[in-house]
Image (cartoon, rainbow, N blue to C red):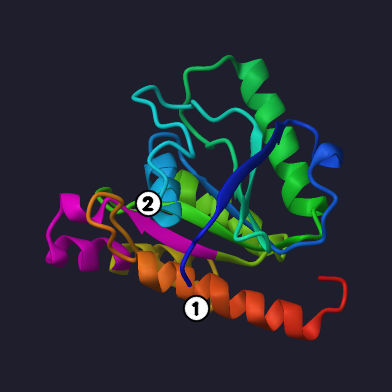
């Protein structure tokens, strides 16, 4: 898939105010400072579509971007560390949960994980929530240019081991990416294209 157009549509903290269009949505979420904005900008060929910042926790709303006029890329606030108050974190969690559990247009979420670090409990817990809630998702390992191929394989193996220990039958589908080197771009967009084709073919409401 080639992204020809990427248009910002709306930011809000109320799921009921999200776009009414019945187009497939792909949500991007991860711990703060995981490189989410850089990845989104790389995928869409826009340097400033998603705001990047050296300060973790910059994204604080549900952001909808219309891609190629036929699907939405949704940029969600990060979970985990962010320099915001506990009250604000609670509000984030509430509308993120509302989005995942009520948004009918969501067809897949991409959970971003910094490949430089060994398996983090907070990521495992978040993915367990997604699995228990039966929300379809893939893992996107980011910042692959920062470590060696050997370490990448080692860290992915550690995630597999930890997930199996948490009663996962298999590792979710995953991608290894680098926003700096555009690693994984073609694979990720091809996956979205394949899912879109299935969605439009099998569901009349899309």
Describe residue 101's horizontal placement relative to residue 128 as left or right: right
In front: mark 1 or mark 2?
Answer: 2
Task: Choose between 81 and 49: the one closer to the eye.
Answer: 49
Describe residue 111's horizontal placement relative to residue 205 as left or right: left
Give the class, few, some or many, for how many residues have Cα within 10 Å of label 2's Cα (few <14, many ≥20): many
Instruction: Write the residue at 50% across / 75% down.
Output: 191
Give the class, few, some or many, for how many residues have Cα within 10 Å of label 1's Cα (few <14, many ≥20): few
* SS type, badge 2: helix
Instruction: Write the residue at 82% across / 61% down.
Output: 22
Q: Is residue 60 above or below residue 42?
A: above
150 within the magenta span: yes
> Taking the image as drawn, is residue 171 in sight?
no
Residue 170, numbered circle: 1
> Taking the image as drawn, is residue 13 in sight?
yes
Which image quadrant is residue 131 in?
Answer: bottom right
Residue with the mark numbered 2: 42
* SS type, badge 1: loop
The mark that comes first in sequence, 1 or 2, is 2
Percent coordinates x, y for residue 175 in the rendering: 39, 67
Label 1 – label 2 distance at C-alpha:
29 Å
> Quarter holding the C terminus?
bottom right
Instruction: Write the residue at 35% across / 53% down.
Output: 119
Residue bounds of the magenta highlight = 138-156
Describe residue 139's horizontal placement relative to residue 24 as left or right: left
Describe residue 104's horizontal placement relative to residue 163 as left or right: right
Task: Choose between 47 and 13: the one closer to the eye.
Answer: 47
Percent coordinates x, y for residue 181 in the rendering: 22, 56
């Amino acid at each position: 898939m080639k992204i020809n157009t990427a248009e910002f549509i709306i930011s809000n903290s109320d799921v009921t105010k999200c776009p009414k269009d019945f187009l497939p949505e792909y949500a991007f979420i991860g711990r703060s400072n995981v490189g989410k904005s850089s990845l989104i900008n790389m995928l869409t060929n826009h340097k400033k579509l998603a705001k990047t910042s050296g300060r973790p926790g910059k994204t604080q709303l549900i952001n909808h971007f219309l891609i190629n006029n036929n699907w939405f890329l949704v940029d969600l606030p990060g979970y985990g560390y962010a320099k915001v108050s506990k009250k604000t974190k609670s509000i984030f969690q509430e509308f993120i949960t509302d989005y995942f559990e009520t948004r009918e247009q969501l067809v897949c979420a991409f959970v971003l994980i910094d490949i430089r670090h060994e398996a983090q409990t907070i990521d495992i817990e978040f993915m367990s929530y997604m699995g228990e809630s039966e929300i379809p998702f893939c893992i996107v390992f980011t910042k692959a240019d920062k470590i060696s191929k050997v370490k990448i394989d080692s860290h992915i193996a550690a995630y597999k081991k930890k997930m199996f220990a948490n009663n996962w039958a298999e590792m979710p589908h995953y991608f290894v990416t680098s926003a700096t080197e555009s690693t994984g771009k073609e694979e990720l967009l091809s996956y979205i294209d394949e899912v879109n084709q299935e969605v439009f073919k099998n569901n009349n409401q899309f």
